[in-house]
Amino acid sequence: MRKVFKTITASALLLGAVSIAHAADVIDEVPLAPEAQDLGEAPTGWDGAYLGGKITQQWGKVREGGDYNTNGLGAGLYGGYNLQNGKIVYGAETDLNYSGIDSTNNGVKVKQHLNGSVRGRIGYDLDPVLVYGTAGIAATDLKASDSTSSDSNTLIGLALGAGVETKITDQITARTEYRFNNYQTQNFKLDSGTVERSLKEHSVNVGLGVRF
């Protein structure tokens, strides 16, 4: 009996030792949690595409030999693409707008409808603010009418402007921009006679955009 007891005890001790050793091996084999990776700071530049909407206050002069003042409210969409080299940001932008300019003088009513531009843009990054200038080609649809007839023409012109854009988040931006558009003169054929009209337009717009 004593021999059996010793055998059982020895077997139990051996089994315990093996179990402990095996447990230690299992613990050694448990994979360690991956070390946290340094992902770096989120990009703060202006590179990439963007799209936005804006509201616009416009004022200007319609030329017809002399000039007369006109103004209105408008709204539009804009989009473009930025590249960045150091603090210098440059790219191209286009916009499409609907104008509220509507004015009558000497029996002829002039109304500006759709207008838009294609421009280059260059600025300086004061993160999170971008200060920029812009220049390019503008076009607008201008309609002239008298009491019995109307005629529309597309006017081409030069667009110049400057603005400030700031990041609300890394994807959302807000901007304020001044623009001057100087359009060519066109002839409008009406029942009351052919008239010449051109448009010099100033505008201030406030926009909200999304970066992609």
Image (tube, grey):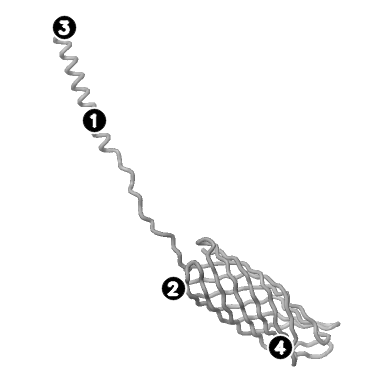
| Spatial separation of the CA atoms under disc 4 and disc 2 | 42 Å
Q: Quadrant of residue 75?
A: bottom right
Q: Nearer the viewer, mark 2 or mark 1?
A: 2
Which residue, given by chain and number where applicable, does mark 2 sit on?
87
Of all residues shown, which one is farthest toward the right? Answer: 147
Query: First in sequence: mark 1 or mark 3?
Result: 3
Tell whether 115 sits left or right of 146: left
Which residue, given by chain and number where applicable, does mark 3 sit on?
1
Q: Secondary structure at mark 3?
A: loop
The amino acid sitting under disc 1 is: His
The amino acid sitting under disc 3 is: Met
Which residue, given by chain and number where applicable, does mark 1 sit on?
22
Labels 2 and 1 touching (C-beta < 8 A): no
Quadrant location of the N terminus in the rendered image: top left
Query: First in sequence: mark 4 or mark 2?
Result: 2
Query: First in sequence: mark 2 or mark 1?
Result: 1
Labels 3 and 2 touching (C-beta < 8 A): no
